[in-house]
């Protein structure tokens, strides 16, 4: 006999399709981290231009924004499993292209940005499909457990991936891009092995009304709107990932391996919290828990920006990762539970644009501010902005703050 779902920390893995999906997502995230560390370091090494580090994030985000009405609709109308697998293949091709440029000694910013645009288009289609596929692979009673493990797979990749990327790049950029290519290819195969799950598809003819259904649902459901917009503005202001090569080389005097360690630090904090949440899920005060997480993320950002010591910077980044994981766990569970399956792709497309804006545009903000006022003020000001967002959203979205348990809306209303 298995433990009851509420007490079974491995409940999601009792479903074989989810297990394959979990490892595919892990490999894809691992490959992305290796590619990200390698491109950022190689770009800064060859150009010395901090502004280019911000552009790396921007060119990957813009496709998600421009294609937002298409990507979500595709995830709601077509086989989500096939979409994810095809996108992994495109990622492998992008990694292979960067590998080819490196081997040919033709790493040139314009060509690299063009490849990253394709990579961004792939991610624009993959993100809503990935986010929408997971709830189709487990019953609702195991969904919060699956969300915790989904986050832990990404965060585990965030721990190992940057360190591996730094080490592999230090040995040879060719090796780093080769490993990224192999992992993307393996992830695609694993997704193809997932049994096609049941999916409630949107049967309405394509129109402006159906294309905007995701926006309409989000703006009509204050809990979902508050959760998504909170992440957008908090990480948009607090993001400092793009500036890590600058902090690693110019402030903390670390090399590629040190950059990998800095990139891994948030993941270390996050995976600790993710495992704790999978074992001891939140029972009460989930909304308050989320806002505390955002505030701690802002505080950690300020400490990181001011630190001149590697150990303190790593500790601050671990706090940021732990706090972000706490917030993301509540936010993603709420979005999954409160969104009907037939519009899940379109809602997740909007959500992933918000996530992309908070990450990639956050990197662009940090890179641009660093270019004009320096990296330390750029990070510290962003941290204080995140603290302000936590306070403003807690007051502006009382429905979100008062969320008690992570259950479907109808179950909470029945209490």
Image (spheres, rainbow, N blue to C red):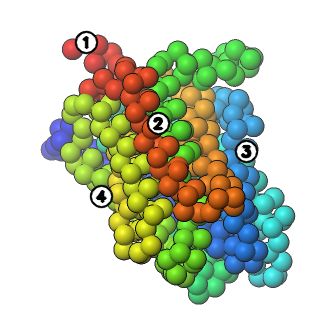
Q: Residue at x 44, y 55 (%)?
A: 301
* Residue drawn where x is 61% and y is 34% of the image: 349
Quadrant, the C terminus: top left
| Residue depicted at 46% across the width and 19% down the height | 222
Secondary structure found at label 3: helix
Q: Quadrant of residue 363?
A: bottom right
- Nearer the observer: mark 2 or 3; the answer is 2
Residue ID for mark 4: 272
Assign a secondary structure to mark 1. helix
Residue under label 3, please give it.
62
How far is mark 2 from mark 4, CA to CA? 25 Å
Question: Which comes before the other along the chain, label 1 or label 2?
Answer: 2
Which quadrant of the view contains residue 173?
A: bottom right
Give the residue at mark 1. 414
For mark 2, what is the residue?
389
Residue 84, image x, y percentages: 60, 47
């Amino acid at each position: 006999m298995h433990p009851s779902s509420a007490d079974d920390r491995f409940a999601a893995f009792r479903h074989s399709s989810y297990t394959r999906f979990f490892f595919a997502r892990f490999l894809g995230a691992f490959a992305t981290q290796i590619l990200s560390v390698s491109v950022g370091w190689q770009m800064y090494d060859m150009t010395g231009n901090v502004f280019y580090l911000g552009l790396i994030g921007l060119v990957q985000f813009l496709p998600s924004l421009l294609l937002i009405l298409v990507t979500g609709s595709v995830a709601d109308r077509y086989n989500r499993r096939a979409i994810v697998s095809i996108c992994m293949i495109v990622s492998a091709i992008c990694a292979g292209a960067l590998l080819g440029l490196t081997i040919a000694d033709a790493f040139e910013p314009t060509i690299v940005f063009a490849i990253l645009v394709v990579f961004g288009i792939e991610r624009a289609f993959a993100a809503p499909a990935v986010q929408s596929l997971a709830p189709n692979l487990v019953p609702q009673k195991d969904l919060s457990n699956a969300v915790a493990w989904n986050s832990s797979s990404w965060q585990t990749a965030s721990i190992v991936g940057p360190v591996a990327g730094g080490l592999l790049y230090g040995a040879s950029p060719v090796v780093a891009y080769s490993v990224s290519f192999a992992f993307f290819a393996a992830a695609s195969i694993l997704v193809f092995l997932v049994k096609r799950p049941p999916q409630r598809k949107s049967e309405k003819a394509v129109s402006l009304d159906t294309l905007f259904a995701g926006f309409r649902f989000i703006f009509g459901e204050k809990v979902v709107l508050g959760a998504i917009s909170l992440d957008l503005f908090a990480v948009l202001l607090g993001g400092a990932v793009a500036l890590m090569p600058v902090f690693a080389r110019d402030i903390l005097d670390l090399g590629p391996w040190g950059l990998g360690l800095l990139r891994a630090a948030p993941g270390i904090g996050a995976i600790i919290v993710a495992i704790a949440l999978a074992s001891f899920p939140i029972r009460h005060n989930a909304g308050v828990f989320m806002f505390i997480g955002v505030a701690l993320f802002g505080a950690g950002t300020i400490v990181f920006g001011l630190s001149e010591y590697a150990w303190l910077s790593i500790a601050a980044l671990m706090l940021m990762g732990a706090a972000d994981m706490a917030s993301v766990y509540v936010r993603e569970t709420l979005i999954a539970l409160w969104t009907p399956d037939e519009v899940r792709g379109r809602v997740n497309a909007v959500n992933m644009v918000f996530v992309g804006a908070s990450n990639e545009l956050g990197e662009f903000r940090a890179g641009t501010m660093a270019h004009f006022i320096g990296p330390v003020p750029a990070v510290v000001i962003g941290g204080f902005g995140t603290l302000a967002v936590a306070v403003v959203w807690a007051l502006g979205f009382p429905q979100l703050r008062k969320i008690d348990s992570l259950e479907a809306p109808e179950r909470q209303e029945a209490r």
